[in-house]
Amino acid sequence: MTVVLALLIGLLLALYIRFNQNRLSRLVMALTILPQFIPGLVAVYSMMLVVRNGGTLSRLAQAAGHTFNPNLMYSAKGLIMVNLWFNIPFAALLLASLTSIQEASIESARDVGANRWQLLQKIILPATYKQFFIAGAFIFMGNVGSFTTPFLMGGNTPQMLGVVLYKEFNQYLDYNRAAALSVILFALCSLSAIVYVIVNMRREKWR
């Protein structure tokens, strides 16, 4: 879910930044790289203070005379939201491919009657295929082995693989199961790495 949402949001942000040259678009571009400069543990704890019941959002709603409990702590929704925060910088990968599209190509397509959907389908998406696969591979590898965020914000069930591996090794002392989970984790990351290598080897074909 995080991979799909991150790619969709990244594409929308990249499209907005590419085709809107104004202060807001420059601000959005700066915000896409902001998570890279905030330590992961600090970001998770800060997000917990904001979204937990009784946190910042709840207090602001209470000050306005309303009751609001996000119920995002220890839930899949909150975990996905925080993971998206960490994956925002990968939107820059999609933006890099959009900036390579020449304005003359877009104007020529508009001159022959192409609408926005046709521009997206025939010009923009073909230019972003490679970045989609690369960004998806990085996001998947970062999330499948994630530990800090799911450990602090994830619920007891279901648990992400990194947390299960930690508990099997340190709490239950089941080293055989921990070894098996490590192999599974390595295999999943290897699949993403293979996708990344194949896409880069076929660079000329994607062009």
Image (tube, rainbow, N blue to C red):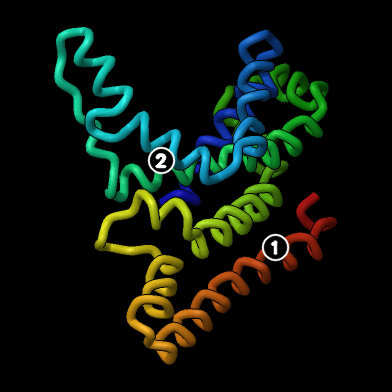
The reply, left or right, for residue 125 in relation to residue 63 is right
The residue carrying mark 2 is 81
Q: Relative to the observer, which residue lies in front, 18 or 193?
A: 193
Q: Residue at x 68, y 9 (%)?
A: 22
Q: Tell me the kind of residue under disc 1.
A: Tyr
Q: Residue 147's x, y, as percent? A: 47, 60
Residue 188 position within the rendered picture, expressed as x and y whole percent measured from the top left: 54, 73
Q: Dot 1: few (<14), some (14–19), or many (≥20) neighbours within 10 Å?
A: some
Name the image quarter holding residue 77.
Answer: top left
- At mark 1, the secondary structure is helix
Residue at the far bottom in the pictured view = 176
Counting every numbered tag in the picture gives 2
Q: Which residue is mark 1?
A: 196
- At x 58%, y 24%, the residue is 116
Residue that appears at 43% across and 39% down: 45
Query: Which of the two labelled residues, at mark 2 and mark 1, occupies the earlier sequence position?
Result: 2
At label 2, counting other C-alpha atoms closer than 10 Å, the crowd grade (few under 14, some 14-19, many 20 or more) is: some
Whether residue 122 is visible here, answered yes or no, is: no
> Label 2 sits on what residue type?
Met
Residue 126 spot, x, y in % from top left: 68, 44
The circle on residue 36 is none
> Is residue 94 among the parts visible in the rendering?
yes
Residue 34 found in image quarter: top right
Cβ–Cβ below 8 Å for labels 2 and 1?
Answer: no
User: Which of 59 and 162 lies nearest the eye of the viewer?
Assistant: 59
- 159 relative position to 65: left or right: right
Front residue of this view, candidates 136 and 33: 33
SS at mark 2? Answer: helix
Q: Residue at x 64, y 55 (%)?
A: 133
Residue 189 image position (x, y, % from top left): 59, 70
